[in-house]
């Protein structure tokens, strides 16, 4: 199986200019992606942000779009800013850590405030508004993706996307 590798470093700048718009609002051309063969996942990442942390933990939000013909799963996340990054799902207002989240073929995995999200635990430093946090996303079938997540104000609410 051919593996897909890409880096979404331009996402942070595109999000700032596009007001955190989704890939359908024009920021998709700035998010890195790769074409996949039929029957493979074709992943791209957009709408990424982290509210400035106010404690020793932080949340992270983003959208993973799969335009390929195969399902994939987000299986783990790491960042040099945190001792541990965990994946959480929210069901009926209660969050819980999960081992993975599905990314359907021709679909999306949306990590948004009040829903599924990333938790940055044991922060080694508290990122400030305007900085970027490097995050590596790992998947069941696709190669890892590194994303530069912009740090927004603690009270930030996106106007589009999430």
Image (spheres, helix red, strand yellow):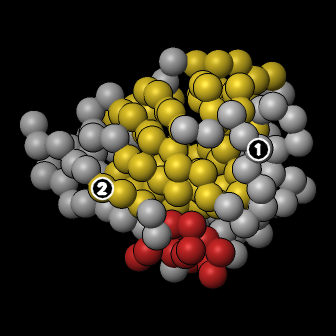
In front of the other: 105 or 2? 2
Query: On the rendered structure, is 31 left or right of 60?
Result: left
- Residue 40 horizontal/vertical position (percent): 20, 44
Q: Give percent across and percent down for residue 103.
A: 43, 39
Tell me the residue at 51%/44% (across/down). Answer: 135
Number of the label disc, if any, that sits on residue 6: 2
Q: Nearer the viewer, residue 67 or 8?
A: 8
Marks 1/2 in contact by CB < 8 Å: the verdict is no
Which secondary structure lies at badge 2?
Answer: strand
Q: Is residue 124 visible?
A: yes
Q: Is residue 115 visible?
A: no
The label shown at residue 126 is 1
Q: Residue at x 38, y 47 (%)?
A: 145
Looking at the rendered structure, the secondary structure element under dot 1 is loop
Residue 23 x/y as whole percent: 50, 69
Determine the CA span between mark 1 and mark 2: 27 Å
Position of 129 relative to 98 (above/below): below
In the displayed structure image, the side of residue 38 where residue 110 appears, left or right: right
The x, y position of residue 158, in whole percent, is 76, 64
Which residue is located at x 76 percent, y 44 percent?
Answer: 126
* Residue at position x 39%, y 34% in the image: 138
């Amino acid at each position: 199986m051919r593996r897909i590798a890409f880096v979404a470093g331009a996402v942070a700048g595109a999000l700032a200019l596009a007001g955190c718009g989704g890939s359908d609002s024009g920021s998709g051309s700035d998010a890195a992606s790769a074409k996949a063969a039929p029957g493979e996942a074709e992943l791209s990442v957009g709408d990424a942000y982290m509210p400035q942390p106010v404690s020793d933990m932080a949340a992270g939000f983003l959208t993973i779009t799969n335009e390929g013909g195969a399902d994939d799963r987000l299986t783990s996340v790491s960042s040099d800013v945190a001792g541990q990054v965990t994946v959480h799902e929210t069901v009926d207002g209660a969050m819980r850590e999960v081992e993975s989240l599905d990314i359907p073929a021709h679909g999306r995995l949306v990590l948004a405030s009040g829903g599924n999200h990333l938790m940055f635990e044991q922060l080694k430093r508290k990122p400030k508004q305007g900085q970027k946090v490097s995050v590596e996303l790992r998947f069941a079938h696709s190669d890892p993706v590194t994303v530069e997540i912009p740090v927004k104000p603690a009270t930030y609410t996106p106007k589009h996307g999430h």
